[in-house]
Amino acid sequence: MIAIDIRKPLAGSMGEMTLQVSIEIEEHAFVAIAGESGSGKTTLLRTVAGLEKADGKITVGDEIWLDAKSSLPPQKRKIGFVFQDYALFENMTILQNLLFVENDKTLATHLLNLTSLEELAHRHPATLSGGQKQRAALCRALMKRPKLLLMDEPLSALDPAMRTRLQFDILRLHKEFGTTSLMVSHDPSEIYRLADRVVVLDHGKIIQDGTPAEVLLKTAGSQKFSFKGELLDILKRDVIHIAVVAIGQQIVEVVLDEAEANTLSIGDIVTVSTKAFAPTISKA
């Protein structure tokens, strides 16, 4: 069991705030941390890793990582950390990057085989694609067989096809190594595919905590789906209006009547939903 009960003043996106999080995480769980930018997600991960100071207490099993008397140094916490920017040593080969963490060639070779990097073991990071670098970073994070794997939007810079590939790699490694995983993500499909629990932060506080289905699939009335997006344009074609909306990586068109069109402005964040197969659009 991992118990986190921390408080830390922050300068958030909407001014001063306090990151105040109290949660317990079961061993071997995969928890996604979601929320708007500036809500405290990355700070939470960095505090658990010991990279930032906070008041409170963190315990992992029988070990105390943080309390009022002391804070365990990051290098003594049994963690693996995967950053957005890979953070590989450019002057070392991929294999050397792994062995720098732990001199265990058997484990390094096993990890490289699991992620299809065995043929690239003696290449330097500069010669690899973004997806290959992120797989190498994931392997390096697991070289100490960590109790806790922390990932800060590890796939955000990759294209959709590579993101999906690496999601399966992450899930396979999470299960094989029996880690407890804590991942910051903005991607609902990624969260749904990987996590068994979602914690949503807003202005430093937990506002939702449940399974991906409970948190991500909430709809009102008889709606079958509901997505938020940005209104890019409103086009008039004969007697109807067409709303052009960006939802994630896709652009969709929704038919509006004149009254609906008059309530919307370009740049609005809107909700696109359907009821009985008839799409509707409204301000979020």
Image: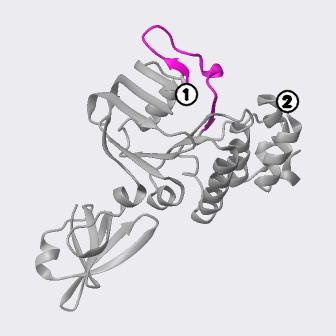
Q: Is 136 in front, or is 103?
A: 103
Residue 65 point in image, percent of width and height: 53, 20
Question: Is 240 above or below relative to 218?
Answer: below
Q: Label 1 sits on what residue type?
A: Gly
Of the 4 image quadrants, the one containing the C terminus is bottom left
- In the figure, is residue 114 to the left or right of 244? right
Q: CA distance from mark 2 to mark 1?
A: 26 Å
The answer to which quarter of the image holds residue 86 is top right
Label number found at residue 209? none
Q: Secondary structure at mark 2?
A: loop
| Residue placed furthest toward the bottom | 238
Q: Which residue is mark 1?
A: 61
Q: Quadrant of residue 27?
A: top right
**Residue neighbourhood size for the residue with mark 2, other residues' Cα within 10 Å, grouped as few (<14), some (14–19), many (≥20):** few
Query: 69 above or below 152?
Result: above
Query: Which amino acid lies under the numbered mark 2 shown in the image of this protein?
Result: Asn
Q: Earlier in the sequence, mark 2 or mark 1?
A: 1
Residue closer to the observer: 212 or 132:
212
In percent of width and height, residue 255 lies at: 25, 83
Q: Position of residue 260 (x, y in %)?
A: 15, 75
Q: Is residue 236 left or right of residue 76?
A: left
* Image: magenta residue range: 61-82
State which mark lies toward you, 2 or 1: 1
Q: To which residue does mark 2 refer? A: 103
